[in-house]
């Protein structure tokens, strides 16, 4: 059931790549069982921010993070926290579908196997594929290679793969941008269905998509030093119909971007 | 790669006779170079075939060497090669893969990894006889392994390890970054990413590299002579600490004998060696082609 | 919340213990050890060569070694001047470069500037075959085929001689000169060629006056690395060039190279630890220093041309 608590909060977050500051002092909250969209012009740090939410940014060698990302009353950047554990709770779907060159079943089962969650694995795989609206299309060919699926199906497979480890939050980095319009619609519809049980944060450069799909929206921009910062955030309807900041209005009405 | 069509257009421009003559002469020079190298290879193959084929027989493969050329065979050398190369493979596969993974997935880009990389490329240029001296000193005497199969295998491993490492690194690099990211995002730790995502995809390349390394090792005589110090052997090894000979050494032994028959024996031995190498390289090419067809990305 | 899965147990999450961190550390250390084998190897090579040749230098002295022109460590009267071996090595290597550099360079120019695709797919495998043939085979070829043929031209040619070995070694290292030079040439930007063609140059002129000069450091590097290979080559010279160290520049005579000497001793009965035994490490050390210096120069040049492209 929907509730209005913040399930994930970002407090005064700054991200540096070596000397370069990519994100400047962002504070933001993400509400449970809602879709929050991160929008803004290219290079303003949306993807960087997203990657911080499940410590995927750790994989970049010179990346350094200041500030806090709070989940379950704990800063996930606390040195005692295991990033791999964080990612079991906060999953990620990428821009270009990236299924492993394995069978459909093995793709979905991968996260379960490596984390030792192999009890009733076939049931878990089926459940995840159903939640990703892919089960009917693949139930007869689970042992076929994932590479035989279409682009849209592959992306739904990646979503099923993420759902298998039962995260609470799902991060999506422009999940439909590599897909055709039909695939895009399928993903957007899936996103809305998933909010029943999950919280979604999606980065998108497509404003119409943000308006269609999200409950909350955050608008980011780049300053003169190319550091990203938060301009405005709030309910999607308010942002799009009644923006508080004139820069927001300019972006939304297409005067730049 | 140069734009051939573009170049061809401009070659039609009219020039003075002197310039055109020079161009013709130069082109003939190029063809001569091709001719010389091709002739060299061809005469080598023909000569070896001519001398060696009459001596090839099943008997040749299964008999021990002998003073009498009619009775002589390559058995001890072939079995010795099998023993040494098997142990070499057992060593270079884990060590080479481990080193490649360390350099690609674990190491930070610091001075230490730079030194390791410079080392690997330097070692590739050290003469093979120096490896023989190293093996003699360290494995045969200092570690007390004696002039054994194991000492030979260890020496060859050090010699060809750079090949395995370089090729394995390339194979690891072909695995798309996106697959690694997906695995990390599912909560995998670094070893799981290495073992469950990268390794399965990199195996064909790693196998190709291993086969190339082993085919280089099979042809090495100099370091093996330093280790084994024997050229005439009439038994096969039964354990890794036994003495041994290998095919190139046997060939060398036969070449060194002035009597007529031995020349043919040497050539026959060369044919066996070359066929072995051909088979190994064909296997490597087959593996490479099969995986190129299968990869969909 | 929907999850009954242990994975989402908040208590377990809060503890934050790094799962499998011990396994991670062990695996990382094992992989590091594998990578450090290369450093250990280098240290072992240098250490072995130095340690084993020090007793020799203590008895014979560096100057007699480097400056003496007679090498006879086994037969009396003993002499320990290494120059004959160095000269023998250099003579054979020089002859091989005389063959390999022109042919290799011409092949490289052909492959890079002239060759149609079909011919390329024949030439490149041919070169790979030449490069992959074990050196005993080349030794056999030199001794049993090249030498008799040459004796028709040079009746004075000895059975073991530097010329046959040098010529065949030239054939052997041609692929190395060719492929490294070709890399350097294909890296030259097409825009340079276009500029020359636009000024009316012929293909020959573009190749010889634009591409080759632009690829000079890469070509020189290929020659250096091939020279190093020629110096370090063992079996070919052991079989075909002879076992008689001499101060001669006459390629028709038999000589002995540094590498062939080491093989000779390794096959002999010299007792471990004796002065004669240690000579192979002294010669080996000299060989290692030569090849290391040339290789470093070659790699430095390769870096240089890679950066300038």
Image (spheres, coloured by chain):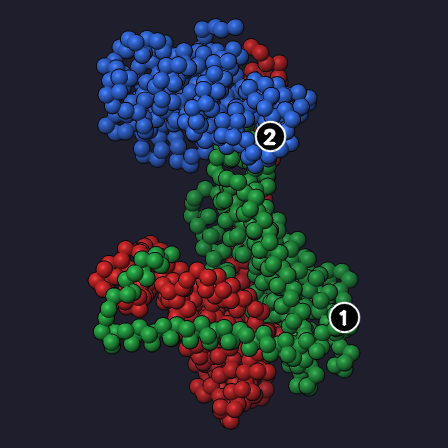
Chain colours: A blue, B green, C red
Give the quarter of the image for residue C129.
bottom right
Which residue is drawn at the image coordinates 42% and 24% (left, top)?
A: A181
Q: Is residue C143 left or right of residue B36?
A: right
Question: Could you say which is closer to the camera, residue A220 or residue B241?
Answer: A220
Give the quarter of the image for residue A6.
top left
Label at residue B241: none
The residue beneath circle 1 is: B58
Which of the image's four quarters has the N terminus of chain B? bottom left
Question: Residue A101: horizontal and vertical position, in percent?
Answer: 57, 36
- Looking at the rendered structure, the secondary structure element under dot 1 is helix
Q: Chain of mark 1?
A: B
Q: Is residue B168 visible?
A: yes
**Does residue A182 lie above or below B173 as drawn?**
above
Cα–Cα span, label 1 and label 2: 51 Å
The residue beneath circle 2 is: A104
Q: Chain of mark 2?
A: A
Question: Could you say which is closer to the camera, residue C290 or residue B192?
Answer: B192
Q: Residues within 10 Å of mark 1 (few under 14, many from 20)?
A: few
Q: Is residue C268 visible?
A: no
- Looking at the rendered structure, the secondary structure element under dot 2 is helix
Question: Residue C202: horizontal and vertical position, in percent?
Answer: 27, 67
Q: Is residue A92 left or right of residue B25?
A: right
Q: Residues within 10 Å of mark 2 (few under 14, many from 20)?
A: many
Give the quarter of the image for residue C195.
bottom left
Q: Is residue C36 left or right of residue B256?
A: left
Which residue is drawn at the image coordinates 52% and 6% (left, top)?
A: A1
Question: Could you say which is closer to the camera, residue B154 or residue C228?
Answer: C228
Question: Residue B193: horizontal and vertical position, in percent?
Answer: 55, 36
Which residue is drawn at the image coordinates 69% and 86% (left, top)?
A: B259
């Amino acid at each position: 059931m929907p509730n209005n608590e913040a399930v994930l909060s970002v407090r005064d977050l700054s991200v540096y790549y070596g000397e370069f500051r990519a994100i400047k002092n962002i504070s933001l909250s993400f509400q449970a069982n809602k879709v929050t969209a991160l929008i803004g012009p290219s290079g303003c740090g949306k993807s960087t921010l997203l990657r911080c939410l499940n410590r995927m940014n750790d994989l970049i060698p010179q990346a350094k993070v200041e500030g806090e990302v709070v989940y379950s009353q704990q800063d996930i950047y606390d040195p005692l926290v295991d990033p791999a554990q964080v990612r079991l709770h906060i999953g990620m779907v990428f821009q270009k579908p990236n299924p492993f060159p394995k069978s459909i079943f093995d793709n979905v089962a991968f996260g379960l196997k490596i984390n030792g969650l192999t009890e009733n694995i076939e049931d878990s795989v089926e459940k995840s594929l159903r939640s990703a609206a892919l089960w009917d299309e693949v139930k007869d060919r689970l042992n076929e290679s994932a590479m035989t699926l279409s682009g849209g199906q592959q992306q739904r497979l990646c979503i099923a793969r993420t759902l298998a480890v039962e995260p609470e939050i799902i991060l999506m980095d422009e999940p439909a941008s590599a897909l055709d319009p039909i695939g895009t619609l399928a993903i957007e519809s899936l996103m809305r269905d998933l909010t029943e049980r999950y919280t979604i944060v999606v980065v998108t450069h497509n404003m119409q998509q943000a308006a269609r799909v999200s409950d909350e929206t955050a608008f980011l921009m780049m300053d003169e030093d190319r550091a990203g910062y938060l301009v405005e955030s709030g309910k999607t309807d308010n942002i799009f119909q009644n923006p508080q900041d004139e820069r927001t209005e300019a972006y939304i009405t297409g005067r730049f971007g | 790669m140069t734009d051939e069509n573009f170049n061809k257009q401009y070659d039609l421009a009219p020039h003075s006779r002197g310039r055109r003559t020079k161009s013709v002469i130069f082109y003939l020079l190029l063809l001569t170079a091709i001719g010389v190298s091709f002739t060299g290879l061809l005469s080598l193959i023909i000569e070896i075939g001519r001398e060696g084929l009459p001596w090839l027989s099943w008997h040749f493969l299964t008999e021990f060497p002998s003073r009498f050329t009619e009775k002589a065979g390559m058995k001890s050398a072939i079995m010795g090669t099998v023993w040494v190369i098997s142990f070499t493979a057992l060593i270079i596969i884990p060590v080479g893969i481990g080193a490649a993974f360390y350099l690609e997935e674990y190491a930070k880009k610091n001075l230490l990894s730079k030194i390791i990389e410079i080392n690997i490329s330097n070692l590739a240029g050290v003469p093979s006889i120096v490896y023989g001296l190293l093996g003699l000193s360290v494995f045969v005497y200092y570690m007390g392994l004696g002039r054994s199969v194991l000492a030979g295998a260890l020496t060859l491993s050090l010699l060809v390890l750079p090949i395995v490492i370089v090729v394995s690194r390339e194979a690891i690099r072909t695995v798309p970054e996106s697959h690694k990211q997906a695995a990390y995002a599912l909560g995998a730790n670094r070893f799981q990413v290495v073992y469950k995502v990268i390794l399965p995809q990199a195996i064909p390349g790693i196998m190709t590299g291993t086969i190339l390394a082993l085919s280089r090792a099979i042809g090495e005589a100099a370091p093996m002579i330093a280790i084994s110090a024997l050229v005439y052997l009439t038994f096969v090894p039964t354990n890794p600490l036994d003495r041994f000979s290998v095919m190139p050494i046997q060939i060398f032994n036969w070449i060194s004998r002035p009597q007529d028959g031995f020349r043919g024996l040497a050539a026959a031995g060369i044919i066996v060696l070359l066929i072995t190498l051909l088979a190994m390289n064909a296997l490597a090419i087959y593996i490479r082609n099969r995986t190129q067809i299968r990869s969909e990305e | 919340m929907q999850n009954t899965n242990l994975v989402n147990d908040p208590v377990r999450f809060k503890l934050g213990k790094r799962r499998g961190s011990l396994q991670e550390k062990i695996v990382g250390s094992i992989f590091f050890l594998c990578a450090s084998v290369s450093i250990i190897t280098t240290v072992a090579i240098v250490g072995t060569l130095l340690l084993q040749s020090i007793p020799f230098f203590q008895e014979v002295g560096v100057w007699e070694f480097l400056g003496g022109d007679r090498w006879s460590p086994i037969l009396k009267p003993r002499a320990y001047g290494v120059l004959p071996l160095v000269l023998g090595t250099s003579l054979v290597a020089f002859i091989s470069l005389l063959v390999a550099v022109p042919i290799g360079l011409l092949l490289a120019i052909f492959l890079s500037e002239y060759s149609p695709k079909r011919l390329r797919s024949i030439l490149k495998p041919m070169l790979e075959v030449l490069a992959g043939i074990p050196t005993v085979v080349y030794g056999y070829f030199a001794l049993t085929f090249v030498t008799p043929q040459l004796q028709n031209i040079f009746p004075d040619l000895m059975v073991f001689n530097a010329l046959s070995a040098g010529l065949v070694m030239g054939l052997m290292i041609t692929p190395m000169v060719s492929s490294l030079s070709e890399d350097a040439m294909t890296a030259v930007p097409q825009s340079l060629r276009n500029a020359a063609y636009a000024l009316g140059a012929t293909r020959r002129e573009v190749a010889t006056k634009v591409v080759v000069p632009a690829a000079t450091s890469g070509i020189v590097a290929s020659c250096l690395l091939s020279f190093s290979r020629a110096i370090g080559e063992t079996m070919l010279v052991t079989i075909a060039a002879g076992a008689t160290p001499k101060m001669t520049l006459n390629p028709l005579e038999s000589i002995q190279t540094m590498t062939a000497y080491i093989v000779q001793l390794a096959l002999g009965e010299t007792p471990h630890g004796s002065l004669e035994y240690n000579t192979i490490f002294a010669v080996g050390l000299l060989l290692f220093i030569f090849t290391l210096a040339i290789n470093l120069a070659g790699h430095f040049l390769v870096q240089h041309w890679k950066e300038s492209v």
